[in-house]
Image: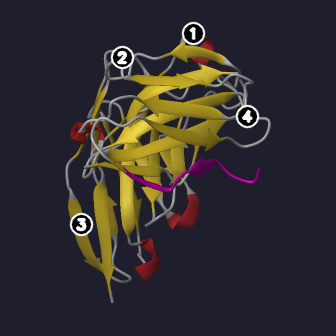
């Protein structure tokens, strides 16, 4: 089984400041990793995913994340945040299966609420 | 449709009543997933379908919960004899296929959810 821990439940930050949202996972098998964002009254939207290859993954809206296998982490970063980035962010994992594919049975973290202040 | 559509968006019911939540996935998407999200928590997997076949229902909490997708498109999640602990956001997601060798992982598109409140 997999588990995901998002180390911060709330992260306040000022506009144009950098931000890092932390995610650690636990798994006995290889996994794929994801970050989703949830804006108020909307569905979850995929920000980025790590499948294989380069450990630095770039996503939408200027976000990026780095996969660190030794530390079992997948922290999300943005060098300069905007008011519009205020939302809840979820880290998620799914195990790989034979052939490097997977299906969408995701294990999510508890979420981090990012609040950007002017 | 253009996105995953869920209805109703909000449902308030009394304890003991049955509720049915509907999900209309993106047209052509093979796989459909149901998740439940309690307040302050991340979504938890309930069940999923490939076409009309229910492939995994390990996340359904008890036998009061059931789901179907009879024609491989629209799905209904039914909760019988609702209890207050069933109050949550119920999210549906769909994906083009259950595995994608080109990308290595399918990508889920989520609906806005159905918020269930049991009084």
Q: Which residue is mark 1?
A: A98
Distance Cα–Cα, label 3 vs label 1:
38 Å
Distance Cα–Cα, label 4 vs label 1:
22 Å
> Is B46 drawn above or below residue A8 in the view shown?
above
Using the image as rendered, state which of residue B8 and residue A67 is in the foreground: B8
Q: Tell me where residue A51 sits by quadrant.
A: top right
Q: Which residue is mark 3?
A: A11
Chain that bears disc 1:
A
Left or right of B37 in this view: A104: right
Circle 4 — which element? loop
The span picked out in magenta is: B1-12
Mark 1 neighbour density, 10 Å: few (under 14) some (14–19) many (20 or more): few
Q: Same chain, marks 3 and 4?
A: no
Q: Which residue is mark 2?
A: B63
Distance Cα–Cα, label 2 vs label 4:
27 Å
Q: Nearer the viewer, mark 2 or mark 3?
A: 2
Q: Position of residue B55 (x, y in %)?
A: 56, 14
Q: Which residue is mark 4?
A: B29
């Amino acid at each position: 089984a997999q588990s995901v821990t998002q180390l911060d439940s709330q992260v306040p930050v000022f506009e144009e400041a950098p931000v890092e949202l932390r995610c650690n996972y636990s798994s006995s098998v290889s996994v794929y990793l994801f970050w989703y964002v949830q804006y108020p009254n909307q569905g979850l939207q995929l920000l980025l995913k790590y499948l294989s290859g380069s450990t630095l993954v770039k996503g939408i809206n200027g976000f990026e994340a780095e996969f660190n296998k030794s530390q079992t982490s997948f922290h999300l970063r943005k060098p300069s945040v905007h008011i519009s980035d205020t939302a809840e962010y979820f880290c998620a994992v799914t195990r790989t299966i034979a052939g490097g594919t997977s299906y969408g049975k995701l294990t999510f973290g508890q979420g981090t609420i990012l609040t950007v202040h002017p | 449709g253009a996105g995953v559509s869920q209805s109703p968006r909000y449902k308030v019911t009394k304890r003991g009543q049955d509720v049915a939540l509907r999900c209309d996935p993106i047209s052509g998407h093979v796989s459909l997933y149901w998740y439940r999200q309690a307040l302050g928590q991340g979504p938890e997997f309930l069940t999923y379908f490939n076409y009309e076949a229910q492939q995994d229902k390990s996340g359904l909490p008890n036998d009061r919960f059931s789901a179907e997708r009879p024609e491989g498109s629209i799905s209904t999640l039914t909760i019988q004899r609702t209890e207050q602990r069933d109050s949550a956001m119920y999210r549906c997601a769909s994906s083009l296929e259950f595995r994608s060798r080109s990308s290595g992982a399918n990508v889920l598109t989520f609906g806005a959810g159905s918020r269930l409140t049991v009084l």
